[in-house]
Amino acid sequence: MNLHDFLFIFSYLSATCRIDSPQGDISTLSGNFARALCGLALSRLSGLSLFHLKSFAAIINRNDIGQRTSLIEGYIKMGKRQVFSRIFSVLLFSLAASAASYADGLAAIKAAGVLKVATSLSVTPYTYTNGEMQPDGSDVATAKQLAKDLGVELKIVGVPVASRIPMLQTGKADLVISVLSMSPERAKVIDFSRPYSLIREVIIAPRNVAVKGYGDLVGKAVGVTRGTVEDKLVTENAKGAEIKRYEDVATLITAAVSGQVQYVATGLVSLDELNKKTGNRFESKFVMKDFMLAIGLRKGNPELDKWVDQWVQTNLENGRLNKIFRHYHHVDLSPEVMNWKK
């Protein structure tokens, strides 16, 4: 290996190994190194200079094919058509390498013996930290049962609400089971299982305040959890409201208890917790929307998608998921979940 070869591999690893990657993620480092060696072999065939190899290493690191395409188009607009023709062969390699790294997620999880599930641990009783400082809730119990049936160890990855999908996309979690509502926007970037639960999103305010619709929120400070469907609903429908965004539901509830906000957009399940801390001062004013909750999966994993979908269907039919839900919510799952059809 000559100096040029060494510099290429160093440049590739520098571009592909993020500084926020877990230090113990040896599989990511070794995978990047293997792809660097393959890229080196192809670079000799393509005749790219070191400058363009370094630039293209960054392109290879883009998980999103659309991002790669945009970067390649940039080369074309700059008039570097010769470079593009040489890069094209390496682009094919990069697409294949990424596909291989994410392909057959089900087999990868079984081989690793660990299922990494991202959850926020901030939405009681779905997902929270209990008195023994352990992850708990109906979503956590669902994740435990799924991992058990898959025959692997469960690793709960606690994340802020807004980080649930990014953790999935970057491979730091295999699944998201965390009060994740299905929406067309999210479906563009991740896959969903069939619904396993439901959440009712409402506007909560003090009992002595009259609120019948979004129009009554004009000029009012409304608390939401950042990056959630509640955030989107209030932003789109309560024009003129002062929206205050918090990183998780626990912080949002604390803001309402302390009087920072009087109006709260959140799941109906949070009303009990809020009233326990305020002497029963709050009530639900109106329903914004009912949302189906589903398990989030990274795109490009058809075998894992199929397995999780069948697991949800089987455990709805045998009553196991309803038993979990009843234990934490004290009511049965909505018939809407049981009878859902694509």
Image: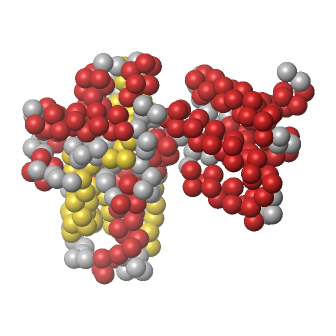
Q: Nearer the viewer, residue 74 or 242?
A: 74
Instruction: From the top left corner, tell me how far across and down residue 62 is, in percent.
Output: 62, 46
Q: Image point 73% across, 47% down: which residue? A: 87
Asked which quadrant contains residue 143, the reply is top left
Residue at 41% from the left image edge and 71% from the top image edge: 235
**Residue 98 in sight from this viewpoint:** yes
Which of 296/67 is in front?
A: 67
Compared to residue 194, the image places residue 255 above or below, namely below
Name the quadrant of the C terminus. Answer: bottom left
Place of residue 5 in the rendered image (x, y in percent of width and height, measured from the top left): 84, 28
Quadrant assignment for the N terminus: top right
Quarter of the image for residue 327 reads top left
Q: How is the image coloured?
A: secondary structure
Q: Is residue 328 left or right of residue 167?
A: left
Query: Residue 331 falls in which quadrant of the image?
Result: top left
Query: Horizontal placement of 82 versus 278: left or right?
Result: right
The picture places residue 44, in percent across and down from the top left corner, at: 80, 34
Check the image and report above or below for 158 versus 257.
above
Residue drawn at (69%, 48%) of the image: 88
| Residue 330 locus on image (x, y percent) | 12, 41
Q: Residue shown at 66%/45% (left/top)?
A: 91
